[in-house]
Amino acid sequence: MHAYTITHAIDDKNVLRFHIDYFKRNQNAKPGEAIAQQAVVEAILDKHDAATNQRKFNAVLATASINNAIEYYQLFKEIQKKKQTENPDYAPLNIACVFSPPVQLIAKDGDQQSQKNAADIKQFQEDLTQEKEDNKQNPEEKKKALIEIIADFNLQYGTNHNINEFDLYYQDVQRRIKDQKYSNKEYPHKNKIDITIVVDMLLTGFDSKYLNSLFVDKNLKYHGLIQAFSRTNRVLNDTKPYGNILDFRSQQEAVNQAIALFLWGR
């Protein structure tokens, strides 16, 4: 039986190839080891415009945990605010963050709508292994952080989302990623998302031709690695020759193993 691999799909021009860069780090650092988050944020801010063809496309930052996602979100706010203070002409990137809320806190209100929202979250959380586990620890802190993230989103985009209707917020994030297809003249940049910080969400099943870059501060392997990388390689036109991957965990060996298994079929 013939196996149709990603290599065949690339050859058939159904998907794009990947361009993978590994962030230069201390020679003593071990593969898979996290580096300082501030260094990651500064590198992303430095490289984002070139990676996305001057923001024609957008990106996802994959993080290892909900706590990491929250920390990254706050760092982007702080560093970009400082850049604006130092340079009034600095155009900040629009940063969104999405992770599933602690379902036990959504359900505890007891009313029928809360129970329905909790059931919806629990259903899609079944595939979010890391998030499901993370939400068992200090759920009140995670809920508070997500409420603040959604409040920032509402302020940026003039929306009225709340944590109790999380799915509507999540759908809006996905839509704005796809809305990158419109020119700034047709649809102002302030309405779009440049980088979405995630843990498990959006790394499988989500497709947008205008998402071309993945920043990785998360250990990935085999199927999960190829799935995450593949968010970037949907075919558009000559302005998008490949999917960009910038790995901050020196995962060359994991990448090679995944490519050998899933791209070459062995």
Image: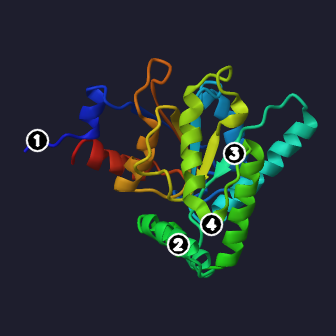
Q: Which image quadrant: the N terminus?
A: top left
Query: Does dot 2 land on a helix, a strand or a loop?
Result: helix
Q: Which color scheme is applied?
A: rainbow
Kindly tell me whether residue 76 is visible in this rendering: no
Measured in 3D between alpha carbons, the distance from the residue under mark 1 to the one under mark 4, in whole angstroms, is: 47 Å
Residue type at tag 2: Ala
**Can you tell which mark lies on residue 118?**
2
Q: Residues within 10 Å of mark 1 (few under 14, many from 20)?
A: few
Residue linked to disc 3: 95
Query: Does dot 1 land on a helix, a strand or a loop?
Result: loop
Measured in 3D between alpha carbons, the distance from the residue under mark 1 to the one under mark 2, in whole angstroms, is: 43 Å
Q: Residues within 10 Å of mark 4 (few under 14, many from 20)?
A: many
Kindly tell me whether residue 55 is visible in this rendering: yes
Tell me: 153 left or right of 120: right
Looking at the rendered image, the disc whose residue lies closer to the viewer, 2 or 3, is 2
- Residue 117: % across, % down: 54, 68
Give the mark nearest the N terminus, 2 or 4: 2
Measured in 3D between alpha carbons, the distance from the residue under mark 3 to the one under mark 1, in whole angstroms, is: 43 Å
Query: Does dot 3 land on a helix, a strand or a loop?
Result: strand
In front: 111, or 199?
A: 111
In front: 13, or 107?
A: 107
Give the mark nearest the N terminus, 3 or 4: 3
**Can you tell which mark lies on residue 2?**
1
In front: 35, or 198?
A: 198
Q: Is the residue under label 2 in contact with that under label 1 (CB below 8 Å)?
A: no
Give the mark nearest the N terminus, 3 or 1: 1
Residue type at tag 1: His
- Residue 149: % across, % down: 71, 57
Residue 143 position (above or below residue 73): below
